Structure formats: C-alpha cells, structure tokens
Amino acid sequence: MPKHHRSNALFRIRFHGRGGQGVKTASRILGQAFFLAGYEVQDAPRYGAERRGATIFAYVRASHDSIYERGIIRRPDLVVVADETLVEIPAAGVLQGVTKTTVVLIHSKLTAEDWIKRYTPLEKVVILHPVKTRRQELHLDSAACAGAAACLAGVITRDHLQRAIEEEFVGQKGSLVQANLTQALDAYNQMALDSGLVIAGSGDQGTTPASPDWIDLPFEAADISAPTIHAALTSTQVTTGLWRTLRPVVDENICRRCGLCSSYCPEGVISLDDQGIPVIDYVHCKGCLVCVVECPAHAIHAHPEPVPEGEQT
Amino acid sequence: MTRTLLTGNGAAAWGMRLARADYLPAFPITPQTEIIETVASWINRNEIECRMTTLESEHSMLTAAGAAAATGVRVFSATSSQGLLYGMEMLYTVAGWRAPLVLVNVSRGLAAPITLEPDHNDILAARDCGALQIHCATCQEVLDSILLAYRLAEDWRVRLPVIVNLDGFYLSFTREPVQIPEAAAVNRFLPPFDSGNLCFRASAPTSQAVAVLGGGPYSYFRYQAYLAAMNALGVFEEIGQEFRKQFGRSYDLLDTYHCDDADILFVMLGSFATKAREAVDHLRASGQAVGLVRPRLLRPFPKMALQRVLAGKQGVAVIDQNLSPGGGFLYTELATALYDQSTAKPLLVNFIGGLGGRDISREEFFEIAAETRRAVTAGTAPLPRLLFTAAELREVRKLQAIAGSRREPPRREP
C-alpha cells in the first residue's frame, strides 16, 4: 500500500485524448478506484459533437468530503495526456491551468526532458511509455492511463484498481477484462517510483481569488453579431486529418479505378488522378473508413496511425 | 441500500425503475438518450416489466405518454431542449387532460446557434404549460425527485404532469455516489398508481379530447388546473417530510445554505448551485456573510417560502442561467414574488451566467457578491450583468475572423 494521506484536500485530475481512445473509460476506472478506496468521487467526460478522433477531455475529482465543485477543472493537480499530438493544439486546452506544481503524465515516445524544454509551464512531467500492442488494441490505452494515474495519486492500491476495472467492465468478455487489467497493472507498476507524486489541492488558489476580467458586451449590428459564416472553404483551415486513428491506404495493384470510394467519401477528400486512381487528402481525411467498406475490390486497407517509418506514402 | 456511482441519466433511469413505471414512450436526443438506453437494456434483459415504444417525434411521444396515462397506467418519458419544444403543444394538452405522468427534461441550451451544453431556456419555455417542475442539483436528487414527482403527480389534490429537470453534462454525464433505495421501501413510499376514474374499457368509453367550449366552461377547467398546481406547494412539503422519514434525505421547497445570518444571498437553480455552495464556503472563510437559496419546486413558484427566507436581507444576487427580455426569468419572477410585501425588500441584482454550459468560476461568485454589496451601498441595482470576459470576446473575434464576419458595419444612409 502506498503512503496514505487522509487529508480532506480535493484531487483534481484531467484526462485529454481523442474520441475512440477510451478517455471517458479511463476517467471512470480512476473514479471507481477512488470510490472503492473510500473517497467521494465525481467523474465526467466533456465533448462536443461526438466523433472518433475529435478532442475529448474528462475529469475526476476525489475527496474525503462531499464535492460541490462541478464542470471543468481549471487548476488540475494531475493532467493525463493519452495522445501527445494534442499538446500543440490550443483548442484542446491540455496545458490550461498547468503550473510547475501540476503533474503531467504523457503517453509519449519522447522523454520528460524533451517535453519540459518545449513547453514553459511543464516541470513535473512523467512519461507513460506507449503500450506495445497491435493496432486493434489501441483502446487499451485507457486502462494504461488510468492505471498510471492511480499510482501517481498515491492513495489507490493495486487491488482497488483491479476491482475498479472489473466493476467498469461488468458484462464484457473475460479476455477483454483481462487485457485491460494487464495494461492497467503494468502501467501502475511502471509508475512505482513516482507513487504519490500528485498532491491533492496543489492548484487551489485559496479563498481570495483575483477578479474576473468581465467586460460590458456592447451592441453590434446583426451583420456582425448573427452567427453567419460568410467565408467559403473554412473547413480547409481545420486539419481534421489529425483526428485520424486509422489511415485508409489504396493498393493501386488491386484498385479497379471505379471511383466509388470518391463518390462515397463523406468528406470529399478522395479525388481521382488522370489514371482514375484515388488520391486521398490526408490533411483532411478523418479516417472514417467508409471507403474501406465501400471498395468492391477490397483495395483500400486501414493502417494504424502514425504509419511506421519507411512505410509512409 | 446500495451506494454506487451513477450519472444523472443513470439516476433518472433508476428513479423510473423504482417507481415501477408501466409505459415508456421514447424519442432520442442528446444529452438525454442514455436514460432511454439504460431502461431499454433492463427491459431487454427482463429485469423490469415495462412497455417501451419508440415514436417518430417528441410530439407523438408526449401524445402517447398522455394517452397512456389517461388509460390509468404509470408513465415515464424523457426529453431535452429542442425535443421539449417540439412536444410543447402536447404538454399543454396533457396537463389539460389532468393526466399524471413524469417527464424528465435534461436541460440543454436552445438553437440557434446550436449547443449541446446546458442552460434553462428550454425548461423555462414550459413554465406556463400547466405541468409542475422540480429542479435538481445532484444525481441523488434526480433519483429521489422522480419518486417525489410520482407522488405529487398522482396526488388527488394535484393530478398533473410533473417535469423533473436536470442539467445536461453537469449532471446527465457526471457520475456521483448515489444511494439506490430498497425497492420495498420505495413501494411503501410510492404505492401502486391509484388511477381512479382513469381507465380503458371497451364497455365504458371515455373521451379526453372534450368538445370546443365557450369562455365560461373553458375558464372553469383552466382555473381548476391552476388551483391544482397551487395545491402542489403544500403537497410537496407533506411528501417531502414523508420522504425524509422513509429515506433520511430532506427535500423542502427551497434548498437553503447559510441563510440565517447572511446579509447577501445568491439565488439560483439547478446543478450550478452546488458551485455557488462551494463559493459560499470560501466567501465565509474570507469573513463574508453570504448564503445560498435554490428553489427545488419552480412550478408552482414557492413565493411565500422565498419571502420568508429573503426577509431582512440587504442584497440578493439572482444568478439566471437563462436569458429573457427584461432580465433573467428567476429575477423577474422573484421581483414579482417580493413586490406585495409591506416590509423592506432586499435589493435584487441580476446576473446572467452559465448560458450554453459556460462555467461560472469561484472568482466570479466572489465578484458577484462584491458587485451586489456595491449596489446595496449605492442603493440602486445595475442593469443585468452578463458574465462574460475579455478573453471570451477575443475567442469570439477569432471565430468571426474565420467566418468572414466584417468587424465594421457598413455605412448606412440616415
């Protein structure tokens, strides 16, 4: 059992990832583990229009007292980053409210030093090494993130974590539960040296907070203030290719040049070259894989992102 | 009694299950759908006995709900936002039928522009439809309020539909520890539906859609529904006490926190009030006598209870999570409720916050208290204040730049 501090301070933990990675599940595993460890808990996901690959965050609060805070966590004690590509996207808000006291757990191939050099507020960075799994097991990231976070919090035992996973996966296949358990416990063990690194309430600014910078919103005429989009092609400015977790790749040897993939692509990102061979705009392809399903010749295959070096097209 | 982690939606489904609702007409809408999915999975596994029908719209859903209730079965349904508005015509109709049923609304801001996150303009659009409204602040309260709602709806002094409201995301998708009461205890608190004259028998036809009536009879029936709604204040207090005896949790018309010795009070609805409660703790720690009042029952409006708790206070910050010409709904309703008092009235200061799920931070509650104090000192209330920061305007300007909005309006000839 790691060191046990029975304070009434509130743990504030934020998870960031992409739709499909299991960020909501990770927050639930951690929330359940805190609950089993005797804590009052609040866990919740937050997202816009649900979409695989889009940014999502989730949060967990835990305390020995009743919890009355709600909604976004502005000053987290721990930030868990399941997808490292999110850090550089301002809209994802990964670094929001992060200070030198915040522990940041990143699922990354880089080192902690690399991350600290890149981003000013980062000081307490812990690396969770990517789990070596086959592509179809990417969803197990969530269990690893939850397991690592549980260890960093310092008040959750391996037993709590195990029971939490069993509880959250009730009704699922035994092999799936076992795979998640293995991932979570491996990640928990990986963090052993940093157990208890997260200090509950470390980001709380106390009882005399600064004034908000409220403004008096002035009247603006409807040609400005109606939510109308005038600019054409604004969607090209959003690099939705970053959402992709699976990349459709055309095998030109099998392709019959029928053009069906281009017709079916809901994003309009598959064009045909002068030979009739499909060309996919990977900057905007979201990886929905409708083309893979529709291709009558089975010439389009799904490859995990990022494409291993040497195989890039 | 089991204590477990449930979302607000999960708690709503458990409320329906423990109330043993017979019929569930359904239509999906975010962020409500999880309620229907949860109940559907229980029906599928034969864990509960309930007939579920998927309808083609919320209008049909509420028609089916009212029609089923009028045959004498216990009915549950759920919707949100645009769905509530689409079914609005039938809400008035079903209330007019005096058909008792419970509808959950998961609050979500209304279009346009579109949002998935909560504010109360959806549920407040239903404020005059004749259905009663209970507003919840925690997942536990969602479950408990559904049991209270059936007692209220089916009481012979009331006999009206009841809407139980919970905030999208902040409750619907948020898990908290919830006590799930024992079925036997719930059965004692909420016996089987005594449908009385509501029944369906081929040998004894009845009609709910009564003929066109002139002003006199029309006035009679509408006014009877109004009187029944007003009865709900007393009935709610009664069943709240019964609930406390049975389950140990108190549900009064108002949820009050540190009100007795406060000179400034916050008044607000729903789950954001727990954020205010947290802020009150910090304000108290910094030596400020601030308290919080949250009406649970919004329809009918607990006027006398509010008059009592607000009596003698200097300033009241009314924080409206909705927007209406002339100020927030709660502000105007509260002003009306206090107007006919002969004693000194507190100064009401109106704040508009939490639209489309916008957060209200602790520092903002501090500023709300400070601004209310300044208004009390000045003896005059400022115009309603939208909680909106310079940083938020900068975000909007970025969106407008992408959308190609012009910053400067064109010159117009006078």
Image: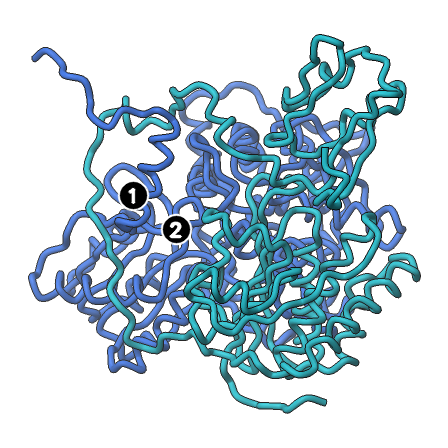
Label disc, if present, on residue B393 of the rendered structure = 1
In what quadrant of the picture does the N terminus of chain A appear? bottom right
Residue B148 visible in the shown view: no
Residue sitting at 51 percent across and 58 percent down?
A: B136
Residue sitting at 44 percent across and 59 percent down?
A: A96
In what quadrant of the picture does the C terminus of chain A appear? top right
User: Quick one: SS at disc 2?
Assistant: loop
Spatial CA span between label 1 and label 2: 15 Å
The cyan-coloured chain is labelled A
Q: Nearer the viewer, residue A251 or A149?
A: A251
Residue B147, position as x, y percentages in the image: 64, 59
Give the quadrant of residue A2. Answer: bottom right
Label disc, if present, on residue B17 of the rendered structure = none
Give the quadrant of residue B316. Answer: bottom left
Give the quadrant of residue B174. Answer: bottom right
Residue B197, position as x, y percentages in the image: 69, 41
Residue sitting at 61 percent across and 57 percent down?
A: B8
Q: Residues within 10 Å of mark 2 (few under 14, many from 20)?
A: many
Q: Colour of chain B?
A: blue
**N-terminal of the two: label 1 or label 2?**
2
| Mark 2 chain | B
Residue B292, position as x, y percentages in the image: 35, 68
Q: Is residue B288 left or right of residue B135?
A: left
Q: Amino acid at mark 2?
A: Gly
Disc 1 with disc 2 on a shared chain: yes
Up/down of B108 relative to B89, above or below: below
Q: Nearer the viewer, residue A199 or B369?
A: A199
Residue A283, position as x, y percentages in the image: 60, 32
Image depth: mark 1 or mark 2 in front: 1
The residue to which callout 2 is attached is B354
Q: Amino acid at mark 1?
A: Leu
